[in-house]
Image: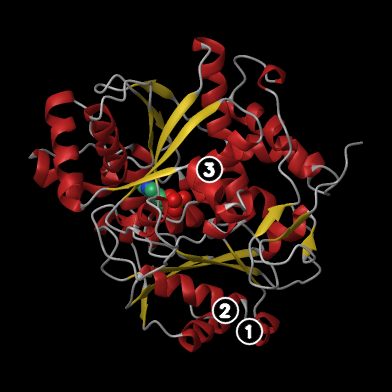
Amino acid sequence: MSRPMVFHSTRDATVSAGLSLAIAAGLAPDGGLYVPAALPRQHPADFAAGADLAETACQLLQPFFAGDPLEVELPAICREAFTFQAPLRTLGFGEAQVLELFHGPTAAFKDFGARFLAACLRRLPRADARPLTILVATSGDTGAAVGAAFDGLPGLQVMILYPDGKVSPRQAHQLGSFGGNVQALKVTGRFDDCQRMVKAALNDGRLQADVPLSSANSISLGRLLPQMAYYAQACLQEWQREGRLLNLIIPTGNLGNALAATWVRAMGLPIGEIVLSCNANRTLPDYFDGQDYRPREAVATLANAMDVGAPSNFERLRWTFPEEELLRRHLRAFSIDDADIMTSLKRHALDDGELLCPHTSTAAAVLDRLRQAADHRPWTLVATAHPAKFETVIEPLISRPVAVPPALQTMLDRPARARSIPPSDSMLAACLRAFPSDQ
Ligand SMILES: *Cc1c(COP(=O)(O)O)cnc(C)c1O
């Protein structure tokens, strides 16, 4: 039998846990994020050509599950989570490809992580008969994906926090459309406030004694691990067909998606360059330009799921490359402001027939800049959401309606409800203590 994998906190290597505990807890007890003691090595030649995403995921993630009670469940977890694919196709401009991550029930890449986390959590034995409440702060897409993944699951309930007025109308509708074991709170503040409130609740021992809590933010290992699967699948496909590395441009906010790609590369799979495309929130671009790491307040942009001023997975990235010099050499980051998002979105829709969401448009704008700088290498854009989720941004730019995928339409046809609260830790605690009796 392979050696069991141990996970420890980014802040203190002596704070450790097995996989099940790390997934159930969300955050490490010292406030750090769980990371594996070491990233396992994988070899491209060990992966069968033509494997589907669930099979690739299972093989890739096996070393992380080694020795854990969930190890025997891994194939079933992967089959349950990866019910849709992540196709890699030729893009209509820039001699590039696009990796489409939006074919899940809520039309954003967050579906992969949320469904995998739900498949893990519902298999974990719990001593406590009370339901486990999953807290999720969302700038739009996470909350919907988590809500959809946990909708109706026994013994589990979800409290979604989102910044009022800072998500698109369709996103807001999705977030409030579940009811029952999935409730939504609209917070009169920013996404960073929602994230801080969730952290405060998770660190509140007295609250935890009354209401067992876990989190489903991108700090959760149960979301991060499955995001590695589509990068492994795509780079192995490129390697097997073209014999070359996959160079990625990844729309980035909290750094969960891009960190997953970084880990896949660090494990030995054929990923080449990784470039982060950010919106006007410049924390990462400034850092990779050589400035000190300076988290700050988020500013609202058209790519709202990336409105993050303090990327929560930065701690994990630091752990991955403890030498700052080395870290700066491993990644690049660009900032694309709203004007450039609109230009990119409009031009590629009207001239190239490629309708991209505002987040994916940041990656397209970065590709355009690279091409202008005479970079002729093969690049792959990561498409993080379906454009139909952002019709209020897109439709005025292209002067026509965006067709809605059927799964998204089903959710939009349901009634929606969210309770409004101020950005206060004690208000959140009160809502959690009242959950689920005030449904
Ligand atoms: C969440 C999200 C992002 C940012 O991903 P991170 O893992 O937070 O960096 C980008 N685009 C869309 C559509 C998203 O929902």
Considering only vertical position in the picture, is 43 above or below 39? above
Of label 2 and label 3, which has the lower sequence position? 3
Residue type at tag 1: Leu
Q: Which mark is residue 207?
A: 1
Q: Which mark is residue 112?
A: 3
Q: Position of residue 252 (x, y in %)?
A: 40, 49
Helix, strand or loop under label 3: helix
Crowd rating for badge 3 (residues with CA inside 10 Å; few <14, some 14–19, many 20+): many
The residue wearing badge 2 is: 201
Instruction: Please report contact status of discs 2 and 1: CB closer than 8 Å, yes or no.
Output: yes
Q: Nearer the viewer, residue 439 or 55?
A: 55
Q: Position of residue 128 (x, y in %)?
A: 77, 72
Mark 2 Cβ and ligand 1 under 8 Å apart: no
Residue type at tag 2: Ala
Question: How far apart are the two marked residues, 3 and 1, measured between alpha carbons?
Answer: 30 Å
Residue at x 54%, y 53% (from the top left corner)? 324
